[in-house]
Image: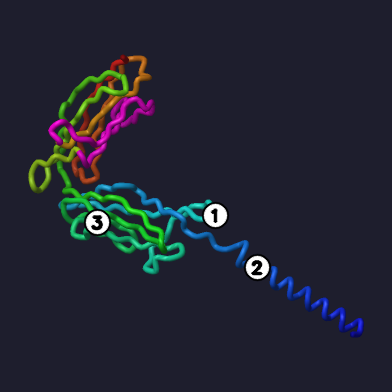
Amino acid sequence: MSSTKHKFSLAGAFAALATLALAVSCTGFFQNPTVSSITIDPPNPTVAFGQNAATQQMTAVASYSDGSTGTLTAGTSCTGNTVCWSSSDPTVASISTGGLLTGLSAGTTTLTAASGAITATTTATAAETVTSMTITPITAGITANGSSTQNFTINGTTQSGSQDISALVTLTPETQIGTPADDGVVSCVAATDSNNDAVQQCTAASDLTTQTTYYLVVAYSGYTGTATVYATLTVTPE
């Protein structure tokens, strides 16, 4: 073989190797990351129906195989970076292709976000809009020991009459109306009392050093009134 032909042969071999290396690097080392898990936001939403009904925009955030995260876009293919939404009971609440949740009747339904083989679920609650709310008791006291509790019941006036909406609201501790408390002392969660009735149950952390009064402000997505509804909770150090 002549020297010139040998040089061309070597050059061709190197070119082939370079092409192969590039192909491997593109398809082997730099593969597009895949969805490994999905988080639905907000979790366990409540959406109001009836007069002045509200909707809730849902989003699906993906965690990818390379450790990154990103919001999935709405689509119908349910693969890649797209997500498909569904409701287990669309007579209670429907969800659009774009993730817009709409309440239709009282109850709960399971929302599913799917992308490929990866799915996530959360429970959505639909409840009637309320024009006014009351909280009982209006005033209460509790000891800051981390274990004693105070239950509150919240009723709302709906198109169907007065309804217990304790399980559907949130109570936000504030030091003054409009000023959320940031000390983490008081926390309130939905629970049931000894009669199995829905309540908001509040406790106080044991690190409080001075007696403090908190305003527990009622928040409900279907409230159409303008007055702030709240109770006061006086917390005393143990």
Q: Identify the residue shown where x is 32% and y is 15%.
A: 237
Label annotation for residue 102? 3
Residue 185: say if magenta.
yes
Q: Which residues are magenta?
A: 167-196
Do the numbered discs 1 and 2 sit on residues whose CB atoms are within 8 Å?
Answer: no
Label annotation for residue 24? 2
The amino acid sitting under disc 2 is Val
Report the side of 112 relative to 155 (left or right): right
Where residue 135 sits: x, y (%)? 17, 32
- Residues 210 and 109: in front is 109
- Residues 159 and 23: in front is 23
Report the side of 202 relative to 182 (left or right): left
Label annotation for residue 66? 1
Where residue 202 sits: x, y (%)? 26, 28
Q: Which is more foreground, mark 2 or mark 3?
A: 2
Q: Identify the residue shown where x is 41% and y is 61%.
A: 73
- Residues 9 and 74: in front is 9
Point out the tag, 2 or 3, that comes first from the N-terminus: 2
Where residue 228 sits: x, y (%)? 22, 34
Where residue 111 sits: x, y (%)? 29, 55
The amino acid sitting under disc 1 is Asp
Please tell me whether mark 3 sits on a helix, a strand or a loop: strand
Q: CA distance from mark 1 to mark 3?
A: 35 Å
